[in-house]
Amino acid sequence: MSEQIIAHAIDLTKDITGPEGHLTILSGLDLEIQAGEALAILGASGSGKSTLLGLLAGLDRPTAGEVWLCGRRLNGLSEDERAALRAGHVGFVFQNFQLLPSLTAYENVLLPLELTGAADAEQRAAEAIARVGLRPRAHHYPHQLSGGEQQRVAIARAYAPRPQVLFADEPTGNLDQATGRAIIELLFTLRRETGTALVLVTHDPELAGHCDRRLRLNNGCLEPLA
């Protein structure tokens, strides 16, 4: 895989079996994500966008096909090996924030840095919290923060390890319009500053419009959008 390609899906298929029987979510999908690019993946609800993001990040396994991430082939890696690859190389921002409720904002950012063994973990966590404008709220717990503040903590946590690629699943989906715009601005400011590739799943045309490339997931395959 080229050093300029940060993630690569080849003939990717994902099938599931549910109450209604066998369902193919992704069908022979191919995708290359270049280092440093911003890519938006759009599509109807239930089209498989979040499934695709999870496969690209190594959070799930495909039924068939290959996924390469940061120069490593994910097929055949154990769950622990995939987690080790993500640590320090991959960031993930969820629609529902996924903060640990028993930890403060600062501690939520600090934890993944400590898990990667970063020598300057405390300094980097403090800098990340400050960078997203939450220094005064650093020692508040998630339930004491607004939705927008919680998403800022999630973004700080994702960027603090200095990943090569950041995956974001509907990062403005649970936010009001004004807060969503602020989060969009923050995401793309950090992307410009760090050079991290950004892969977004979104329904938000404003968010997608900030990206270098836009694709629509339809019937298990990707189609380019203008």
Image: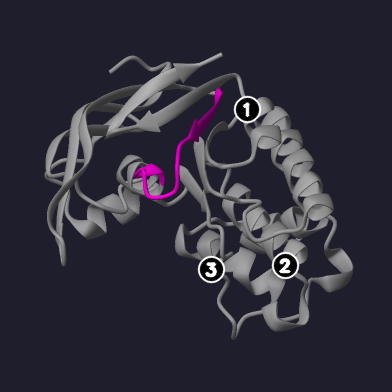
Location of the N terminus by quadrant is top left
The 10 Å Cα crowd at callout 3, few under 14, some 14 to 19, many 20 or more, is some
- Looking at this view, name the residue that lies furthest to the right: 136
Q: Return the x and y of residue 128 as percentages of the image width and height.
A: 73, 54
The 10 Å Cα crowd at callout 2, few under 14, some 14 to 19, many 20 or more, is some
Q: Return the x and y of residue 156 as percentages of the image width and height.
A: 67, 55
* Real-space CA distance between mark 1 and mark 2, rounded to the nearest whole angstrom: 26 Å
Q: Nearer the viewer, residue 75 or 72?
A: 75
Reading the image, the residue beneath label 3 is 98
**In this orientation, does residue 192 appear?**
yes
Look at label 3 and name its amino acid. Answer: Gln
User: For residue 46: magenta?
Assistant: yes
* Real-space CA distance between mark 3 and mark 2, rounded to the nearest whole angstrom: 11 Å
Q: Nearer the viewer, residue 24 or 186?
A: 24
> Which mark, by number, is residue 147?
2
Q: Closer to us: mark 1 or mark 3?
A: 3
The 10 Å Cα crowd at callout 1, few under 14, some 14 to 19, many 20 or more, is some
Tag 1–tag 2 contact (CB < 8 Å): no
